[in-house]
């Protein structure tokens, strides 16, 4: 029962921080957009684009890691949108260290919350693609050591007509030794 209570408390805290930090970050982006000549609805569109893009990129980064796909571009975009969000929060602050710090809190809290939630979710291994062979097909099979077969005497090979010089004879053991050999050209 204590696990359920702890989970509920964590969920309430998560929702409270996420709601308040998200609202503050959205409002700062909206207000800065409107202050610089954008219509009100575009200010909200900018807020949605900047703040939700960081969340989406975090989810995409996690999905790509699970699938073993490259993450360079997505990671770069995530850093860029996080810095943009942070810059917007600080742009409207009082020009002092404390003003900048307090203005950055909503954006940093929101991004930290997203990071914590995404890193705690269980990662499942990717399902194999239907058109790709299973991974164990690429493993090197174990070398099986077998005893060599006993050597058998070579079976007789019928003589062939060779137009080579008479000094060229078949290798030893090809012709049975108890049979007479004819050297020369037979006409």
Image: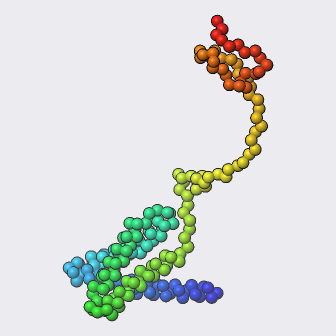
Q: Residue furthest right?
A: 178
Q: Nearer the viewer, residue 41 or 75?
A: 75
Q: Seen in the image, is 97 located left or right of residue 169?
A: left
Q: Quadrant of residue 26?
A: bottom left
The location of residue 45, given as percent across then percent down, is: 30, 75
The location of residue 55, given as percent across then percent down, is: 41, 75
Q: Answer whether residue 48 is visible to the viewer in this image.
A: no
The quadrant in which the C terminus is found is top right
Q: Quadrant of residue 177?
A: top right
Q: Quadrant of residue 60?
A: bottom left
Q: Seen in the image, is 163 located left or right of residue 147?
A: left
Q: Residue furthest left?
A: 37
The quadrant in which the N terminus is found is bottom right
Q: What residue appears at the point 55 percent right and 61 percent down from the top-left corner?
A: 127
The location of residue 145, given as percent across then percent down, is: 72, 48
* 89 shown above or below 61: below
Q: What residue appears at the point 62 percent right and 52 percent down from the top-left corner?
A: 140
The location of residue 32, given as percent across then percent down, is: 26, 83
* 128 shown above or below 117: above
Q: What residue appears at the point 58 percent right and 87 percent down from the top-left corner?
A: 6
Q: Nearer the viewer, residue 23 or 101?
A: 101
Q: What residue appears at the point 46 percent right and 62 percent down from the top-left corner?
A: 69
Q: Nearer the viewer, residue 184 or 122?
A: 184
């Amino acid at each position: 029962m204590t696990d359920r209570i702890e989970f509920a408390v964590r969920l309430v805290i998560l929702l409270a921080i996420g709601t308040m930090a998200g609202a503050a970050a959205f409002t700062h982006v909206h207000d800065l957009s409107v202050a610089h000549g954008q219509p009100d609805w575009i200010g909200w569109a900018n807020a949605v684009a900047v703040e939700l893009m960081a969340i989406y990129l975090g989810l995409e980064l996690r999905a790509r890691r699970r699938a073993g796909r490259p993450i360079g571009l997505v990671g770069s975009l995530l850093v860029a949108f996080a810095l943009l969000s942070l810059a917007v929060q600080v742009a409207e602050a009082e020009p002092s260290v404390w003003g900048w710090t307090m203005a950055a809190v909503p954006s940093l809290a929101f991004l930290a919350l997203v990071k914590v939630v995404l890193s705690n979710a269980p990662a499942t291994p990717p399902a194999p693609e239907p058109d790709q062979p299973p991974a164990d097909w690429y493993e090197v099979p174990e070398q099986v050591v077998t005893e060599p077969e006993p050597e058998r005497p070579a079976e007789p090979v019928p003589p062939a007509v060779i137009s080579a010089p008479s000094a060229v004879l078949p290798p030893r053991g090809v012709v049975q030794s108890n049979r007479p050999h004819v050297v020369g050209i037979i006409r």
